[in-house]
Amino acid sequence: MGHRLEEVVSYPDREMSPQEGAAFEAHLKGCEECRADLRAAEAALGTFDALIRQAPPPLDLEAALARVKQGMEEGRRSRHRRVRLVAAGGFALAAAILLALAFAVTRRPAPAARQLISQPQAPPPSQRLSAPLRPPEERKAAPAAPHDAG
């Protein structure tokens, strides 16, 4: 931009007094730089005016509302699908756990385990009692042995 930028910008909009306008026109005759700046400013203003004068397309509120409702409905459907999928997965997991428990409870023990269950073995020597247990009636009646006060 040139040396008289304020006048270049003010001239196309006729924002100058008649005397200022005449002085600037006289300057333009001898200054190529200001004429080029003026042409660029007028082109920019023309483009800007054309854009302002264009009417925006009419807004179809009913179509916009229908698109919003459709999006909301699709979101609601996908949410219901997720809930159903999670519920089905939970039921499948519960059924698998019940089947595993039923199998574990009703399963017959292996032959070696049955033999151990049917023929109890004597406890190892470290766990044997030194004296046989007496019936509860005899235990209450028997006096306690004195302890050595060591």
Image: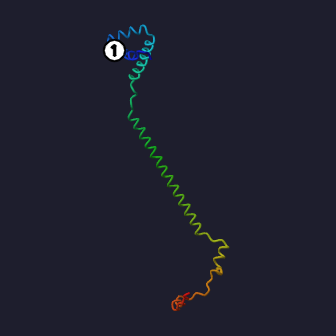
Label 1 sits on what residue type?
Answer: Met
Q: Position of residue 122 (x, y in %)?
A: 65, 81
Residue 4's place in the image compared with 105, above or below, is above
Q: Residue at x 43, y 7 (%)?
A: 30
Above or below, comparing residue 12 to residue 70 in the picture: above
Please tell me whether mark 1 sits on a helix, a strand or a loop. Answer: loop
Residue extending furthest toward the right? 112
- Position of residue 56 measured from the top left corner of the image (x, y, whole percent): 39, 27
50 or 139: nearer the viewer: 139
Question: What is the x, y in percent for residue 82?
Answer: 49, 50
Residue designated by label 1: 16
Whole-percent x and y of residue 67? 43, 38
User: Residue at coordinates 32% horizontally, 13% vertically from top-left?
Assistant: 17
Instruction: Choose between 49 and 78: the one closer to the eye.
Output: 49
Q: Nearer the viewer, residue 17 or 110?
A: 17
Quadrant hosting residue 64: top left
